[in-house]
Amino acid sequence: MSKNALMKKKHSGQITGTDTIVINIIGYILIGFFALICVIPFYLIIVASFTSEATLIRSGYPIFPVEFDVQSYALCLKNPISIMKAYGTTIGVTAIGTFCAVMMASMTGYVLSRQDFPWRNKFSFFFFFTTLFNGGLVPWYIICVRYLNMKNSYLALMLPLMFSVWNMIIAKTFMCGIPQAITESAKIDGANDFVIFTKLILPLSKPLIATLSLFSALAYWNDWYNCMIFITDEDKFNLQYYLQRMLGSAEAMRIVAEKSGIALPSVPLEGMKMAMTVIAIGPIVLLYPFVQRYFVKGLTIGAVKG
């Protein structure tokens, strides 16, 4: 039944309970189908991580577990102390960096959303301009290492991702939808800008905070590039870079063995890739359901306002 026909029936009072049930069933089926499409890749990764390397090479990723094997996890977790250190680094950097990133994006967005701030358009253009042009990798590296002394520092894992123009634009757009009368009435009552932001704006921006937190947490959790550039101390490697180095070392050993003819134990590279994915993505997958409702609402409001 077309949308126009449904609208005509609605205005004429002809939509019955049966029509509503049918529409709901169709909607649930479509949503369930799309949700299944999104879940299947994660399911295949988990199944492949517990499948033997020979089966993966011979038959590809199986739908159901075949030749159950935990060798991939055994190799990935062969040095549990290093894994725990990498996890600790990633969790600490993600927690501190996410808090700072959310506060910076929300505070900047609040200032630029204020109608009484005369330079808000100029600053908005300045921030947007940085998304189009940058100084390049070499000057950025020289500034971070030579002048900011960020070599082998945890700051090198936090500062480069601490401010996101995209998150700031979302915050600004969201806060433009908050009535200015709230700010004006608080000003009349004698509240300063910090009190207004912390006591009034932030409680009204829970969907925004959840959205920015998820964006920032994903960026910090998945980052390996900054660790590769700035960190040489193995005790400060984050999880993503540690796993990437482990996989690179295993693949290099296999290539050397093939070219030199030296017999080495078989390394399940494909299975290790899947196991590393499960190890690295687990906490984020567990976190997402708790912020999903705020995440969807924050994106919707931030997208249509302004």
Image (cartoon, rainbow, N blue to C red):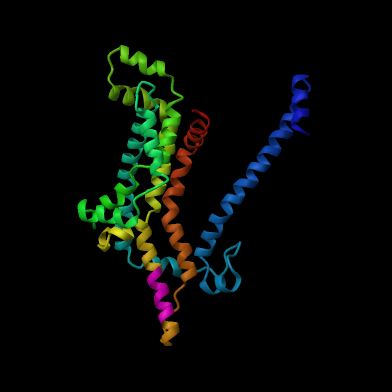
Is residue 253 found inside the magenta-colored segment of the image? yes
Residue lying at 58% horizontally and 54% vertically, measured from the top left: 40
Percent x, y of residue 220: 37, 49
Percent x, y of residue 261: 43, 87
Decide: is 272 above or below 185: below
> Magenta residues?
248-256
Residue lying at 27% horizontally and 63% vertically, measured from the top left: 234
Residue lying at 57% horizontally and 51% vertically, measured from the top left: 39
Decide: is 264 above or below 210: below
Q: Main secondary structure of the magenta part?
A: helix
Foreground of the two, 296 or 153: 153
Q: Residue furthest bottom?
A: 261
Foreground of the two, 101 or 291: 101
Whether residue 92 is visible here, answered yes or no, is no
Whether residue 42 is visible here, answered yes or no, is yes
Decide: is 176 above or below 148: above
Q: Which quarter of the rendered picture does the N terminus lie within? A: top right
Q: Quadrant of residue 129?
A: top left
Is residue 109 found inside the magenta-colored segment of the image? no
Percent x, y of residue 168: 39, 36
Residue 123 relative to residue 190: left or right: right
Decide: is 155 above or below 187: below
Foreground of the two, 279 or 97: 97
Percent x, y of residue 116: 36, 21
